[in-house]
């Protein structure tokens, strides 16, 4: 089970985008995430007439390493570490380490 999943709100703790928050758009691998409006880079794109894509400078999200993001805890308004807990009905859920609050609903 992954600690950070698609749709989770994360906060960047290191690097050029430190302090920014965004939702995880895509989990690229076990340690790389694509986060909305975080780690923006500019790419020079050639026009592609087959896809009706104009050329120019395009700004888009670049992947960010898992060590540079933390799951955002709205109760404490900061990033928080994630642990796992088994519920009495047998489900395994993610919990915030600082408060013990369940992340998954």
Image: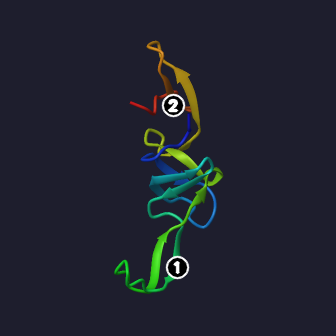
- Residue at 45 percent across and 64 percent down: it is 37
Residue 82 seen in render: yes
Where in the figure is residue 42, as x and y percent of width and height?
52, 78
Please tell me whether mark 1 or mark 2 is closer to you in this view.
1
Contact, mark 1 vs mark 2 (Cβ under 8 Å): no
Residue holding disc 2: 94
**What residue occupies the far top of the structure in this picture?**
88
Would residue 101 be found to the left or right of residue 70 on screen?
A: left
The quadrant of the picture occupied by the N terminus is: top right
Would residue 39 be found to the left or right of residue 50 on screen?
A: right
In the image, 7 versus 46, the foreground residue is: 46
Where in the figure is residue 73, as x and y percent of width and height?
48, 41
- The image quarter containing residue 81 is top right
Mark 1 or mark 2: whose residue is earlier in sequence: 1
| Above or below 99: residue 27 | below
The quadrant of the picture occupied by the C terminus is: top left
Mark 1 nearby-residue class (10 Å; few <14, some 14–19, many ≥20): few
Where in the figure is residue 43, as x and y percent of width and height?
52, 79
Residue holding disc 1: 43
In the image, 21 versus 25, the foreground residue is: 25
- The image quarter containing residue 32 is bottom right
């Amino acid at each position: 089970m992954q600690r950070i999943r698609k749709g989770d709100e994360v906060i960047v703790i290191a690097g050029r985008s430190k302090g920014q928050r965004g939702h995880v758009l895509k989990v690229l691998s076990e340690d790389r995430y694509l986060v909305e409006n975080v780690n923006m880079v500019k790419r020079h794109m050639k026009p592609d007439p087959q896809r009706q894509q104009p050329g120019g400078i395009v700004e888009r999200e670049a992947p960010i390493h898992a060590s540079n993001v933390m799951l955002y805890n709205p109760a404490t308004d900061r990033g928080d570490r994630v642990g796992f807990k088994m519920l009495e009905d047998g489900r395994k859920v993610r919990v915030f380490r600082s408060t013990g609050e369940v992340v998954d609903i």
